[in-house]
């Protein structure tokens, strides 16, 4: 089962992350192209050299990925991430 084979019209905002060494990286690229054609708002973040399940491993890129996920979700729900920070 893959979203590449289904109808993605009308999907909401999507954050997709992949490493260039990820076995599914080519499929991620195909899905991004499909999303563009369907006018689906998708952000595709590519992390050079990262393997499958890299986000869950102890790479420095993993920390950056979790920050990116947090920022993406905060933007979706309208959370002000500057609370308590000097602006």
Image: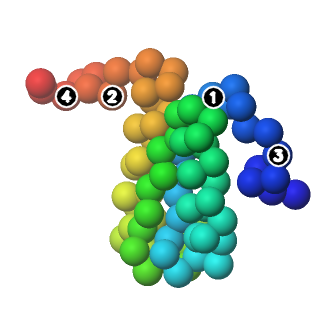
Q: Please tell me whether residue 73 is drawn above or below residue 32 in the rendered image.
A: above
Tell me the mark number nearer the camera, choosing from 2 and 3. 3
Q: Distance between the residues labelled 4 and 3?
A: 43 Å
Task: Give whichever of 29, 49 is nearer the camera.
Answer: 29
- Secondary-structure class at tag 2: loop
**Counting residues from the N terminus, which is met first, the one under dot 1 or under dot 3?**
3
Q: Residue 20 in the image: state x and y as whole percent.
A: 49, 75
Label located before the other in sequence (1 or 4): 1
Residue occupied by mark 2:
81
User: How far apart are labels 2 and 3 at the CA level?
Assistant: 35 Å
For disc 1, the marked residue is 12
User: Which residue is labeled 4 in the image?
Assistant: 85
Mark 2 or 1, nearer chain start:
1
Q: Is residue 82 left or right of residue 2?
A: left
x and y percentages locating residue 9 in the rendered image: 71, 31
Rendered image: mark on residue 6: 3
Task: Determine the residue positioned at 41% across, 48% down.
Answer: 68
């Amino acid at each position: 089962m893959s979203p590449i084979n289904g109808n993605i019209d009308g999907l909401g905002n999507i954050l997709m992350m992949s490493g260039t060494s990820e076995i599914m990286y080519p499929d991620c690229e195909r899905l991004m192209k499909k999303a563009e054609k369907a006018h689906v708002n998708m952000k595709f973040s590519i992390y050079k050299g990262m393997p499958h399940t890299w986000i869950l491993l102890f790479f420095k890129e993993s920390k950056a990925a979790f920050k990116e996920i947090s920022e993406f979700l905060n933007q979706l729900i309208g959370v002000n991430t500057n609370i308590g920070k000097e602006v």
